[in-house]
Image (cartoon, helix red, strand yellow):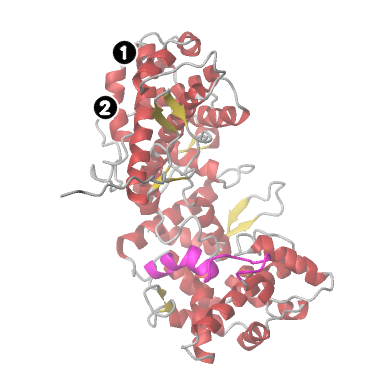
């Protein structure tokens, strides 16, 4: 029997930039997903939680349910109209984007459309909804709903993402909320504009009550959304409780911050990590919020570990980047490169700068000399060191500078660790959930014990090896499950080679900005115009919600 043999080329996997090249961000995502469920990094505005159920409910009241093409076109026009009227309302009033147009779907393209309309040009909505148009507002056929909000609204039982032929509102929660929206807007005029496919400035002005900033004036609608976010009807079990406590913690921080210190993500990170306000003032929270505060502190601890290790990965890749042929060094393994790197001038200089010939002795000295945890404004605190490390990377500083900052952050994390406490405290993360993410707070604790016995050079070699091998493992797993290559390092016949651009260290985004924007939208937070920094303050509504969430 003769077998036929065919030879063919195998296409390489598609290479993409990718994210989380060490898997160090994944535990952070697991933590903040538990602490702020129902709000994500792409659900920026509260009124979309009610607008999308209303839009589909209102369509059902007016049109047949068997014309999918018309539904998609009308949906896209309505999505555009919502953004346009919010932006127009900003221009007619206080021009405060934070209240009106910020994070509205398709805003970049549609603000230019509004510019042209106000200059006297004709506005044809189909120019912005057509998939073939260069002015297209959004690629996804169902706009911001499918791209950003559908999963969250489904989780909150406002919409049914599994419904066919298109996503539907739920009868239990979505329909009553839609009716509340409908009672406070000119729905007939809205649909008249959608049907015609054209909009005038007068149309946008007449529909201004639908602007995102007007949510608090739609009393029933706003109350329903506040009930949802703070789970005042106990509808969402533990997720609702945790969302309420995290929002309550943000409100408590707003009230506690002294004048001159606004509510920002960096402030939230520092205060939750340290348990202290600016000026080393203890941040006293009600007993019911203390576990939530502790969990946010663990999140920030993991994020510091993540960015420090990302910086080490970036430095290693930078050292391995293609050099002039005459001076290029070939390394046959990660370990051989790490050994050479650890014996280089930069590592020797960092060891001298930190007086860290032996890691154990260095950590013993640091425990005595390090700033208190509450002193997060101190330049030697890990919060400040991490900020300088990120800035140093952005400037392209030398290896010595960045490595010293990264190692200092890791050393302080090691010194702050409390062995009697589990690494992830009250956060529900099992060892199985961490199995695919080798660099985490639990493995870091184990690694530190081994590092204490090493010289600084040996420690650096082990740290670099850990980071590079972890990257290879994480990238290989992504290749297996997605078919896409996210490798930034690969072995070759010429030794280790860097692939693509070197990824910069990056913090995770803990949904804080979205949570604050939603609290502004429902009227819980306001700006103090009497202060030069327009400091964020609690409204009466916010104060009441803070007290209720602390009960």
Q: Position of residue 510 (x, y in %)?
A: 46, 48
Magenta residues, as a range? 131-156
The reply to whether residue 381 is visible in this rendering is no
Viewer-nearest residue: 100 or 200: 200
Residue identified by numbered label 1: 454
Residue identified by numbered label 2: 446
Q: Secondary structure at mark 1?
A: loop
Residue lying furthest left in this view?
Answer: 1
Quadrant the C terminus occupies: bottom left
Q: Is residue 279 above or below residue 14?
A: above
The answer to whether residue 368 is left or right of residue 106 is: left
Q: What is the CA distance from the residue labelled 2 to the residue labelled 1?
A: 14 Å
Q: Position of residue 345 (x, y in %)?
A: 50, 9
Question: Is disc 1 surrounded by few (<14), some (14 to 19) or many (20+) residues within 10 Å?
Answer: some
Q: Secondary structure at mark 2?
A: helix
The answer to whether residue 350 is left or right of residue 292 is: right
Q: Is residue 98 above or below residue 19?
A: below
Q: Position of residue 382 (x, y in %)?
A: 47, 28
User: At 48% across and 52% down in the image, what residue appears?
Assistant: 511
């Amino acid at each position: 029997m003769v077998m036929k043999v065919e030879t063919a080329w195998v296409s390489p996997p598609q290479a993409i930039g990718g994210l989380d090249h060490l898997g160090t961000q994944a535990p952070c995502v697991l933590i903040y997903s538990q602490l702020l469920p129902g709000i994500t990094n792409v659900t920026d505005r509260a009124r979309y939680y009610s607008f999308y159920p209303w839009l589909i409910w209102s369509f059902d009241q007016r049109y047949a349910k068997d014309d999918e093409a018309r539904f998609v076109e009308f949906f896209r026009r309505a999505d555009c109209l919502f953004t346009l009227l919010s932006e127009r309302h900003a221009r007619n009033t206080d021009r405060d984007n934070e209240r009106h147009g910020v994070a509205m779907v398709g805003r970049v393209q549609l603000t230019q459309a509004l510019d042209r309309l106000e200059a006297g040009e004709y506005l044809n909505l189909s120019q912005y909804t057509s998939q073939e148009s260069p002015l297209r507002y959004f690629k996804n056929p169902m706009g911001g709903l499918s791209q950003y909000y559908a999963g969250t609204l489904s989780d909150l039982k406002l919409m049914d993402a599994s419904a066919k032929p298109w996503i539907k509102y739920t009868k239990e929660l979505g329909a009553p909320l839609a009716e509340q929206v409908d009672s406070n807007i000119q729905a007939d005029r809205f649909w008249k504009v959608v049907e015609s496919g054209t909009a005038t400035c007068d149309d946008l002005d007449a529909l201004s009550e639908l602007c995102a900033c007007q949510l608090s004036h739609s009393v029933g609608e706003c109350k329903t959304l506040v009930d949802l976010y703070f789970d005042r009807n106990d509808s969402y079990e533990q997720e609702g409780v945790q969302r309420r406590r995290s929002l309550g913690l943000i409100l408590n921080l707003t009230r506690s911050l002294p004048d001159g210190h606004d509510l920002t993500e960096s402030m939230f990170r520092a205060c939750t990590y340290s348990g202290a306000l600016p000026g080393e003032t203890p941040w006293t929270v009600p007993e019911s919020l203390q576990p939530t505060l502790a969990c946010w502190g663990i999140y920030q601890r993991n994020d510091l570990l993540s960015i420090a290790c990302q910086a080490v990965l970036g430095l290693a890749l930078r050292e391995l980047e293609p050099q002039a042929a005459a001076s290029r060094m070939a390394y046959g393994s990660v370990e051989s490169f790490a050994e050479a790197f650890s014996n280089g001038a930069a590592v020797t200089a960092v060891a001298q700068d930190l007086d860290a010939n032996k890691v154990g002795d260095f950590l013993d000295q640091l425990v005595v000399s390090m700033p208190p945890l509450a002193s997060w404004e101190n330049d030697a605190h890990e919060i400040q060191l991490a900020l300088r490390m990120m800035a140093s990377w952005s400037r392209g500083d030398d290896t010595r500078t960045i490595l010293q900052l990264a190692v200092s952050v890791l050393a302080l994390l090691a010194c702050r660790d409390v062995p009697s406490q589990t690494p992830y405290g009250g956060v529900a993360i099992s060892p199985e959930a961490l199995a695919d993410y080798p660099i985490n707070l639990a493995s870091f604790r184990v690694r530190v014990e081994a590092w204490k016995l090493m010289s600084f050079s040996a420690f650096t070699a082990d740290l670099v090896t850990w980071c590079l091998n972890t990257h290879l493992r994480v990238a290989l797993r992504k290749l297996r499950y997605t078919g896409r290559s996210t490798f930034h390092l690969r072995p070759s016949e010429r030794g280790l080679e860097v692939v693509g651009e070197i990824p910069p260290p990056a913090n995770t985004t803990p949904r804080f900005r979205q949570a604050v924007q939603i609290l502004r939208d429902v009227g819980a937070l306001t700006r103090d115009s009497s202060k030069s920094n327009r400091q964020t303050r609690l409204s009466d509504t916010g104060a009441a919600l803070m007290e209720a969430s602390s009960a």
